[in-house]
Amino acid sequence: MDKYLNRLVKSALSTTVGFVCFVFASLALAQNLPNHVDLDAHEDVFNASQVGAIRFLTTTDFPPLNFRNSQGELAGFHIELAEAICVELDVKCTMQSWPWEQLVTALNNNQGDAVIAAIAINADSVAKMDFSQAYLKFPARFVTRAEGQLPSGEAIKNKVAVREGSAQAKFLAKHFKALDAVAFDNEQQALEAVKFADVDRAFVDGMRASFWLNENPECCTFADGPYFSNEAFGSGLTIAVKRGNEATRRAINIGLRRVQENGKFTELYLKWFPVNFYR
């Protein structure tokens, strides 16, 4: 986001919207790639004997984070991130898949040591588990047509497609009052409305939009943002451990910091998310 303010100056949005953009640019982390790990918070030298091994639990229903590939093997960003953490910690790790609804029970019954499967942090989950630091967040993004595509006429200049009832729709209504939200049943429809110039742009989940943009490279592009809000969009992806398992939680945090420092996290992010939704 180090070029974010320059993009705001060039924005075609109203002065009011531009001011709101400036506020969020000031509050958001200045980054073009995910970097939510506090690199200044260096831990003590890790002692592998305190952990020994980490048994990761995941699911197979959330590509590209965790799924089974055509060979039936566990694959995805989470699988490779867990492997990278274990390499940095020099500990043995295993990975097992469980049905989503059984993950928490399996963890608390000592069937595993950590869950890497995008469990939301809320009052219910915090009562049952402890969590690592966040390593990836899902910002909202504006998507607009790329240069050379259908221009926006006066009739749709401030019309923005959203998924009806979504966190992004609520955020837009609260912070971008000068824009006219047009609700669709899902984000696919919202993005198609941009493609065919039924609206000026869309305001949607950045990660999901990145997959659509990867399939429509000539059509559209991200514009402005990203917009982060723990309150609106959640606190991001973390790794869960059993309540009180501080040794494993601390080890995972050290591993996350190390893979961020040595560039491995960025490598995995760009591999599994080829359209960068942080930029």
Image (cartoon, rainbow, N blue to C red):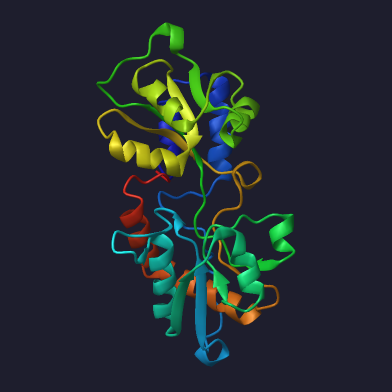
Q: The N terminus lies in which quarter of the figure?
A: top left
Does residue 212 sit above or below 79 in this rendering? above
Residue 127 appears in the figure: yes
Q: The C terminus lies in which quarter of the figure?
A: top left
Which residue lies at the image location 57% right of the left edge and 34% below the top edge? 168
Rendering quarter of residue 106: bottom right
Where is residue 50? Give x, y as percent.
57, 89
Q: Is residue 182 left or right of residue 171?
A: left
Which residue lies at the image location 39% right of the left edge and 60% below the top edge? 77
Relative to the observer, which residue lies in front, 26 or 60?
60
Residue that protrudes farthest toward the top in the picture: 155
Does residue 107 sit above or below 200 in this rendering? below
Relative to the observer, which residue lies in front, 198 or 157?
198
Does residue 97 sit above or below 124 in this rendering? below
Which residue lies at the image location 33% right of the left edge and 61% below the top edge? 267
Q: Is residue 245 left or right of residue 41?
A: right
Residue that protrudes farthest toward the bottom in the picture: 49
Q: Is residue 49 left or right of residue 214?
A: right
Where is residue 174? Give x, y as percent.
65, 28
Does residue 205 sit above or below 9 in this rendering? below
**How many numbered marks have been drawn onto this rendered protein structure?**
0
Q: Is residue 234 left or right of residue 127?
A: left
Residue 41 appears in the figure: no
Relative to the observer, which residue lies in front, 177 or 195?
195
Relative to the observer, which residue lies in front, 12 or 230?
230
Where is residue 152? Give x, y as percent.
37, 14
Where is residue 8? Give x, y as percent.
45, 30
